[in-house]
Image: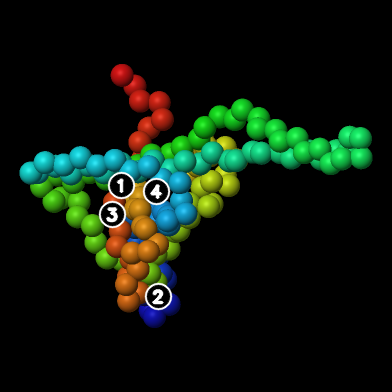
């Protein structure tokens, strides 16, 4: 009987664990290339976060010409990459809150986003999570971070 109870408990617990929401916490700091915009009125507050993910590609070529070192700097034209998130609260229905650092399971840092080769891969990865939160690393107090729930802004909005 104990074995059956244990098996049922494990089955129910694993089902509960799989049904929990997946949460992704995206960390950024003062070194992150970030553009902010904000708008608000009595009931609505909107904050936009746009992260520049362009990879700087400057190449230096050295050569010797007439016994002198010649430096040639190449700046190939690259495609700008960015990803944007919106924080939206209507009548304080999406307040910022504190999260214990030890409870954060899925973390993504700005430098990791910037290192991803294909932007579509990053967007697809983030889209797998039900809830996405932004955290400024400097907002850490006594083991807790200040965080806000955001939504990913589509790159190709349909009009």
Residue named by callout 4: 129
- The Cα atoms of the two marked residues, 3 and 2, are separated by 39 Å
Q: Find residue 92 and report its horizontal and vertical position in percent.
A: 13, 51
Identify the mark nearer the N-term, 4 or 3.
4
Q: Find residue 139 and report its horizontal and vertical position in percent.
A: 33, 64
The answer to whether residue 75 is left or right of residue 31 is right
The label number, if any, that marks residue 150 in the structure image = 1
- In the depicted view, which residue is nearer to us: 10 or 40? 40
Residue named by callout 2: 6
Identify the mark nearer the N-term, 2 or 4.
2
Q: Find residue 134 and report its horizontal and vertical position in percent.
A: 35, 53
- In the depicted view, which residue is nearer to us: 73 or 22? 73
How many residues crowd mark 3 within 10 Å: few (<14), some (14–19), many (20+)?
many
How many residues crowd mark 2 within 10 Å: few (<14), some (14–19), many (20+)?
few
Identify the mark nearer the N-term, 3 or 2.
2
Q: Which corner quadrant holds the N terminus?
A: bottom left
Residue named by callout 3: 148
- The Cα atoms of the two marked residues, 2 and 4, are separated by 31 Å
Q: How many marks?
A: 4
Residue 151 to residue 25: above or below = above
Identify the mark nearer the N-term, 4 or 1.
4
* Residues marked 3 and 1 touching at CB (< 8 Å): yes
Q: Secondary structure at mark 2?
A: helix
Q: Secondary structure at mark 1?
A: strand
């Amino acid at each position: 009987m104990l074995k059956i109870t244990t098996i049922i408990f494990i089955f129910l617990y694993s089902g509960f664990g799989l049904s929990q929401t997946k949460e992704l916490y995206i960390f950024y700091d003062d070194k992150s290339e970030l553009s902010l915009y904000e708008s608000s009125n009595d009931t609505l507050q909107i904050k936009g976060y746009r992260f520049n993910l362009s990879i700087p590609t400057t190449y230096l070529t050295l050569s010797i010409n007439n016994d002198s070192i010649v430096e040639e700097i190449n700046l190939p034209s690259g495609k700008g990459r960015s990803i944007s998130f919106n924080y939206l609260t209507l009548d304080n229905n999406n307040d910022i809150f504190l999260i214990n650092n030890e409870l954060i399971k899925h973390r993504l840092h700005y430098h990791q986003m910037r290192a991803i080769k294909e932007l579509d891969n990053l967007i697809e990865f983030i889209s797998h999570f039900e809830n996405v939160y932004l955290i400024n690393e400097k907002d850490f107090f006594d083991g807790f971070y200040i965080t806000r729930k955001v939504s990913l802004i589509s790159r190709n909005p349909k009009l």
